[in-house]
Amino acid sequence: MGKKVAVFGSFVVDLMARASHLPKAGETVKGSVFKMGAGGKGFNQGVAAYKSGADIAMITKVGHDTFADVALKTMDELAWSKEYILYNKDVSTGSAIIMVDEQTSQNEIIIVPGACSTITAQEVDALRPLFSQCAYVLLQLEVNQDANERVVEIANECGCKVILNTAPYQPVSDEFLSKVYMVTPNEVEAEMMTGIHIDGLAAAKKAAQVFYDKGVQVVLITLGERGVFISDHGREDIISAFKVDAVDTTGAGDAFNGGLLTALSEGKDLWEASRFASALAALSVQKIGTTPAMPTRKEVDAFLQRSTI
Ligand code: ATP
Ligand code: RIB
């Protein structure tokens, strides 16, 4: 097992429906499948990292309701420690309505973060001993941003490197970015954060430079089924995604980020780690759902063994 790591982020319950097309404004569409399950970018990434073998602490916040039980039951089933789960007795656990087009696998999501947007400074301060033991903490932008800002302060003081998955997009301060070690936007987020449309390697390199100018040290830009752009201390390239038949790409970015965290915690270099993360994501898109679609380490290793890229 690798070094200890943490994910600090959202838990929400995903309410997912699939239909032959996504409804237009005012339209009602009959769906084919409904699934309720654990979700939220933070939790999805945490589960992806945990199931792929990381020694990972999951930090999130839930209410006192049946949606919170979905998180707790999932963690019990995985035999995963609930030590860093925070509670808000006055605010409901978060939820997300996810609509998936079963022809194209495109999705539309409304997320209501609820309890996981109420993380207090005191709760973050109490995590200092944990961050002192962690090599990396992985964040997203789905919880209240003042909590993320406090996490980067403390993590930096503790020598714990911050990886920021910039999803869902929201503006962040340069001060915040300057304390982030690695960013992992998708191409849309990269464009929104840098103003550069990512239409190839040259554009991705320019976008990476914008992040470097703000103090970030490593840049990965995920490009969906086209793969991932990696920029690491002067070495820059795109590695292809694995060719698979995707049925639901919701949470592909989460699968990738969770896999990346596991691989980095094991000391793999960024290229090898990105290959591992891409394999994990390729497996996840072949299943319906988000957290429930995350593969085990055995599945990732077997997939990598029979794959050629
Ligand atoms: P989402 O918001 O849907 O969770 P994202 O936009 O954050 O995803 P993407 O860039 O779409 O993230 O995908 C992340 C990674 O997942 C890609 O770099 C790739 O390795 C893998 N991936 C995504 N879609 C596919 C696909 N159709 N086939 C194989 N791998 C895929
Ligand atoms: O990235 C996918 C996740 O985004 C879903 O699980 C949903 O909860 C939204 O937060």
Image: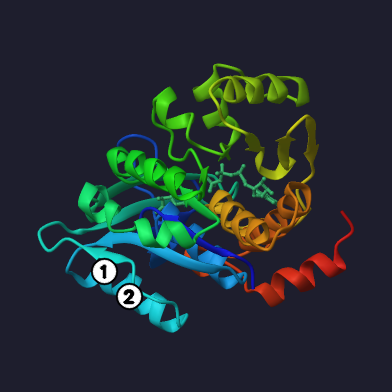
Q: Residue furthest right?
A: 308
What's the residue type where badge 2 is placed?
Leu
| Residue drawn at point x = 52 percent, y = 31 percent | 189
Whether label 2 touches label 1, CB < 8 Å: yes
Q: Residue furthest left?
A: 90
Q: Nearer the viewer, residue 1 or 78?
A: 1
| Residue drawn at point x = 35 percent, y = 79 percent | 73
Label 2 SS: helix
* Picture disc at residue 68: 1
Q: Residue furthest top?
A: 195
Q: Position of residue 174 (x, y in %)?
A: 44, 23
Q: Position of residue 289 (x, y in %)?
A: 50, 63
Determine whether the beta carbon of the residue marked 1 sits less than 8 angstroms from the nearest atom of ligand 2.
Answer: no
Q: Position of residue 89 (x, y in %)?
A: 12, 64
Picture layout, residue 300 above or below residue 126: below
For residue 134, side relative to residue 63 (left or right): right
- In the rendered image, which residue does mark 2 sit on? 72
Determine whether the beta carbon of the residue marked 2 sits less than 8 angstroms from the nearest atom of ligand 2.
Answer: no
For residue 197, side relative to residue 254 (left or right): right
For residue 160, side relative to residue 37 (left or right): right
What's the residue type where badge 1 is placed?
Ala
* Cα distance between the residues tagged 2 and 1: 6 Å
